[in-house]
Structure formats: C-alpha cells, structure tokens
Amino acid sequence: MHEYLKQRIQIFGTVLDKVPEIRYAGDPVLRQATPPSTLEEGREIGKRMESVLIKYRAVTGWGRGLAAPQIGESTSVFVTFVDDRFELFINPKIVEKSETSNLYRELCLSAGVVAADVERPDWIVMEWMDEQGVKRSEKFDGREARLYQHEEAHLRGRLNVDDAVSGGIEILTFDPLKEQRRAVS
C-alpha cells in the first residue's frame, strides 16, 4: 500500500477517536438543505464548530472550514480558518459567480481519505451575516473562493464527491498541503 495512504488512514483512525463530533458521508444530515439560522444559533454553533476544527487541525495538521451539518446541525452556518483566524458565516448565499472555472483536488472532513477533483468558478460574490449580525457582501477569488464554495455546498446537502468531475474521485495518496488549482481544459 502506498506509504502516504497508510499514514492518512492512521490519521483518520485518530480523528474518529479524538473528534467524534464529525459526521461522515452516509449520514442523512449531510444530505439535507439547511434552513436559515438565527444570529444567536449561528454564534452558538459557530463556537462549537471552531472547537471541533481546532481539535481536527491538532490531529491532522490541516482543515480550513467546517459547516454545521458536519457536526450534525441542520442550519445555514459555516466557519473558516484563513490567515490564522476564524470567521463565522451565517446564512451565506452565493449571489454571483464567474463564468471561468478551475479544478482542484478537494478534501472534505466528512469524506475521510477520499479526495474529489472538483471544478468550481474562479470567483464568487457571497452575502452573509457575520457574528455581530452585520450583513456582508464580498467578492472572493483564489483559495478563499474555493473554500467558501465548498462549505456553502454543504449547506445545500452536497459533498465534494457529488461535484467531482468524471473520474475525479480518488483515495488520498497526495499531500493536500502541496495541491494547486489547475486550469480547466
């Protein structure tokens, strides 16, 4: 067996033990579109997601986002960890997206050791409510656009494997920290 895959399987076993809050592919909560969240509910669930993501990162060394369904909560909230800080997104909606796109092998906390090559728009405009209850709207590109699209998809009941390009699902045998976006041919 590929040595890197052995390592990933071992880490996944540790995640199962140390981070039991995470729900995995096959759990019905991951397949449901989420209803809107209140500010109070979003804050409370956001704090729990931050705690889970901190534990996950301590075990694996990576993890940049987590959506409420991934901890068993059916509500429209996700958190991200970008530039060494957490950010809470309550009721996020993608309201505009580019016509151009890119490919990237995405990991998902809820997919274990499976990666999916997913095509997503290069940039998006997203609206959401932040943890202070302020309505926000911002354009994102690059890795942030990809991350936010991935997390927002969870709120619609979709996993990365659902959006994989043909032949794009594989067992994790690559280093995700070295993965780069690629142009679509």
Image (tube, rainbow, N blue to C red):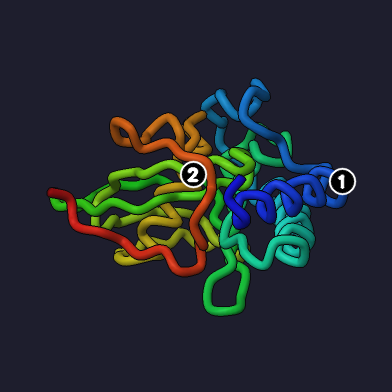
Query: Viewed as shown, does residue 53 lie left or right of 32?
Result: right
> Which residue is drawn at the image coordinates 67% and 33% (left, top)?
24
For the N terminus, give its image quadrant: top right
- Camera-side residue: 184 or 48? 184
- Looking at the image, tell me whether mark 1 or mark 2 is earlier in sequence order: 1
User: Measured from the top left, where is residue 22 in percent x and y?
Assistant: 74, 42
Outermost residue on the bottom side: it is 84
The amino acid type of the residue labelled 2 equals: Ala
> Which residue is drawn at the image coordinates 58% and 50% (left, top)?
2
The numbered disc on residue 115 is 2
- Label 1 sits on a secondary structure element that is helix
- Label 2 sits on a secondary structure element that is strand
The numbered disc on residue 17 is 1
Q: Are the two marked residues, 1 and 2, in contact with CB atoms closer than 8 angstroms?
A: no
The amino acid type of the residue labelled 1 equals: Asp
> Which residue is drawn at the image coordinates 70% and 64% (left, top)?
57
Query: In the rendered image, which quarter is residue 124 located in?
Result: bottom left
- Camera-side residue: 157 or 27? 27
Query: In the rendered image, which quarter is residue 88 located in?
Result: bottom right
